[in-house]
């Protein structure tokens, strides 16, 4: 693994494969929890985050990492899925995180899609604030540079809100839906202002499909046309990516 300080506050770890990235990021989460057992950790849904959860589960099993006091906050949740749908992000994170790590389901907070979404958005912001803010936010990146479900054009200062997904994001996420079902059209998402308020950002990206987005996030202008470019302004952002995802970066 090679570590490069791209800017004063943004570092890039280039790793051989997603499993290595998972171990690196899970190791940093482990250090955080050792220092602060009741840390607030922001979690992402999507295939990029999975290796981190797998590696965290190994730290729990092998090293006895104690996550019992940690509070977990998801980035986003679909609107319009039937309650308990297996692709709802609460269900996905229950399968990937809560069950393998033996967490208390009540420790996982997810925006509530069941009632008035505007009320749920405000309640989610309040819950994050009452928890003391997010210590470490895990992030994937969309092929169009989105973070959570903040699509290109979303203002940087926005907080948790309802958003309409772009055709490309819906098409990308259709792979998780079966039987002719499609990705929902809308979601509740932490805003870019919410994400940027986390004390540390950990972005993971793998594969050539992410190369252009990662290039724009790291080397492009800091601009809402690439929501992930906010990492350049964050006081503590780390990117962990494989060779394919960094292919367009001059490193
Ligand atoms: C979804 C999620 C994002 C995630 C993105 C990329 O749109 N809302 O948080 O970063 O997918 O997913 P993947 O890691 O599967 O490529």
Image (cartoon, grey):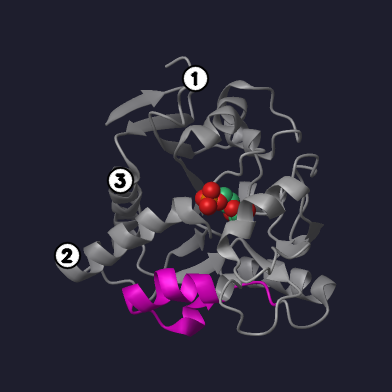
The tag earlier along the polypeptide, 3 or 2, is 3
Q: Which of marks 1 and 3 is in front?
A: 1
Quick check: is 101 in the magenta stretch?
yes
Which residue ends up furthest to the left in the rendered image?
62
The magenta segment is 91-112
From mark 1 to mark 3, how far is it between C-alphas? 21 Å
Q: Quadrant of the C terminus?
A: top left
Question: Mark 1 sits on what residue?
Answer: 249
Question: Mark 3 sits on what residue?
Answer: 24
> 151 above or below 5?
below
Q: Quadrant of residue 218?
A: top right
The label number, if any, that marks residue 63 in the structure image = 2
Question: Horizontal and vertical percent for residue 182?
Answer: 70, 64
Question: Horizontal and vertical percent for residue 106?
Answer: 50, 84
Question: Horizontal and vertical percent for residue 17?
Answer: 32, 40
Q: Nearer the viewer, mark 2 or mark 1?
A: 1
Neighbor class of circle 2 (other Cα within 10 Å; few <14, some 14-19, many 20+) is few
**Res. 199 visible in picture:** no
């Amino acid at each position: 693994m090679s570590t490069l300080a791209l800017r004063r506050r943004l570092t890039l770890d280039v790793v051989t494969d997603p499993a290595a990235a998972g171990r690196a990021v899970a190791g940093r989460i482990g250090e955080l929890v050792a220092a602060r057992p009741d840390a607030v950790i922001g979690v992402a849904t999507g295939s990029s985050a999975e290796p981190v959860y797998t590696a965290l589960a190994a730290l729990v099993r092998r090293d006895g990492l104690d996550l019992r006091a940690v509070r977990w906050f998801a980035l986003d949740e679909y609107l319009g899925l039937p309650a308990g749908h297996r692709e709802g992000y609460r269900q996905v994170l229950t399968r990937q995180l809560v069950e393998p790590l033996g967490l208390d389901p009540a420790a996982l907070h997810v925006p509530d899609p069941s009632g008035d979404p505007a009320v749920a958005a405000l309640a989610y912001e309040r819950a994050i604030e009452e928890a003391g803010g997010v210590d470490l936010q895990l992030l994937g990146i969309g092929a169009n540079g989105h973070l959570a479900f903040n699509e290109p054009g979303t203002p940087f200062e926005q907080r948790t809100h309802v958003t309409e997904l772009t055709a490309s994001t819906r098409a990308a996420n259709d792979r998780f839906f079966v039987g002719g079902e499609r990705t929902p059209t809308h979601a509740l998402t932490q805003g870019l202002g919410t994400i940027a308020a986390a004390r540390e950002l950990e972005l993971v990206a793998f594969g050539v499909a992410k190369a252009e987005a990662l290039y724009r996030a790291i080397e492009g202008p800091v601009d809402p046309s690439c929501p992930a470019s906010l990492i350049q302004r964050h006081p503590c952002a780390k990117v962990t990516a494989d060779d394919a995802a960094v292919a367009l970066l001059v490193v």
